[in-house]
Image: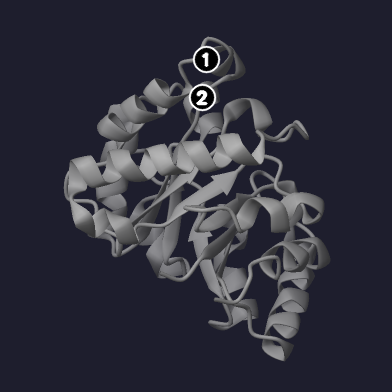
């Protein structure tokens, strides 16, 4: 299993920001990373990014429609992402769940749409602060996994991103022990549902990952990568996170 470090630019970035991808490409060429690298820019930059990156690292979308095409004004299909140069897509991010009311069934449908287009889906799960304070974090995440991850998920077509909602963009992070415990819990849930093949499915951590804490978090047991928000917008910061993985 090769670790995956994914950058989620969210609703940030204009054409001028592609210079950061060029810088990242040059840095990775000079020193190839131990981890696989992925950047998910806004839809508007994806095709241009594919030209700028030229297969130096992977690109992905931040969301996709559950539909393959049709009269869905403003939506983006997984096939459109693939055509623009994507090989991954993020689905079920907490901001999509919160701001757009996405349900577990929506996330599962988007995951299957991603697969039909030949994309690997990164399925996001995570608890709120009140749920963690109530002692429900493990049961909440288990329920999200059960309802969001289709039964035919494999290590080849799916990765899981654990992002505690209360840590996203807040500067707060769980303790290393809490992260390790949750990732072990997620692994056991996946193996119970999907069988031993789920031992090879990557489980990423997200939630205020930055250069200062990356080495501590990303080398914990069962942490197979990161989903990075704001720190992925600058090549230098993102590179420091990418290189935080130990070579094994």
The label shown at residue 55 is: none
The residue tagged 1 is 131
- On the image, which quarter does residue 75 sit in? top left
Nearest the camera: 219 or 11? 219
Residue 44: image location, x then y, percent: 60, 56
Q: Residues within 10 Å of mark 1 (few under 14, many from 20)?
A: some
- On the image, which quarter does residue 49 sit in? bottom right
State the colouring used for the structure image: one colour
* Tag 2 secondary structure: loop
The residue tagged 2 is 127
Q: On the picture, is 218 further left or further right than 211?
A: left
Residue 33: image location, x then y, percent: 63, 78
Residue 72: image location, x then y, percent: 35, 38
CB atoms of marks 2 and 1 within 8 Å: yes
What residue do we see at 56% from left, 47% from top?
Answer: 205
* Tag 1 secondary structure: helix
Image label count: 2
Can residue 69 be seen here? The reply is no
Residue extending furthest bottom?
Answer: 30
Nearest the camera: 99 or 209? 209
Which image quarter holds the N terminus?
A: bottom left
From mark 2 to mark 1, how far is it between C-alphas? 6 Å
What residue do we see at 25% from left, 47% from top?
Answer: 191
Asked if 161 appears above or below 173 in the picture, the reply is: below
What residue do we see at 49% from left, 37% from top?
Answer: 181
Asked if 25 appears above or below 169 in the picture, the reply is: below
Which image quarter holds the C terminus?
A: bottom right
Residue 170: image location, x then y, percent: 75, 31
Q: Residues within 10 Å of mark 2 (few under 14, many from 20)?
A: many
Can residue 99 be seen here? The reply is yes
What residue do we see at 55% from left, 23% from top?
Answer: 99
Nearest the camera: 12 or 187? 187
């Amino acid at each position: 299993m090769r670790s995956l470090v994914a950058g989620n630019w969210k609703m940030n970035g204009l054409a001028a920001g592609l210079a950061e991808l060029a810088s990242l490409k040059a840095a990775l060429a000079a020193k190839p990373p131990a981890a696989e690298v992925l950047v998910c820019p806004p839809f508007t930059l994806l095709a241009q990014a594919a030209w700028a990156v030229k297969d130096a690292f992977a690109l992905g979308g931040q969301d996709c429609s559950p539909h393959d095409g049709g009269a869905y004004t403003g939506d983006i299909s997984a096939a459109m992402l693939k055509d623009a140069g994507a090989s991954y897509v993020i689905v079920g991010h907490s901001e999509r769940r919160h701001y757009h009311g996405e349900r577990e069934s929506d996330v599962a449908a988007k995951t299957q749409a991603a697969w039909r287009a030949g994309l690997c889906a990164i399925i996001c799960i995570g608890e709120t602060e009140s749920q963690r304070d109530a002692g429900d974090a493990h049961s909440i995440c288990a329920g999200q996994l059960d309802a969001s991850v289709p039964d035919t998920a494999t290590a080849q077509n799916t990765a899981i991103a654990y992002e505690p909602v209360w840590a996203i963009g807040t500067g707060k992070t769980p303790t290393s022990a809490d992260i390790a415990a949750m990732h072990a819990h997620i692994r056991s849930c996946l193996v119970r549902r999907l069988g031993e093949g789920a031992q090879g499915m990557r489980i990423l951590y997200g939630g205020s990952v930055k250069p200062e804490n990356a080495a501590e978090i990303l080398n914990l047991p069962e942490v197979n990568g990161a989903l990075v928000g704001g720190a992925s917008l600058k090549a230098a910061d993102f590179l420091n996170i990418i290189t935080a993985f130990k070579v094994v």
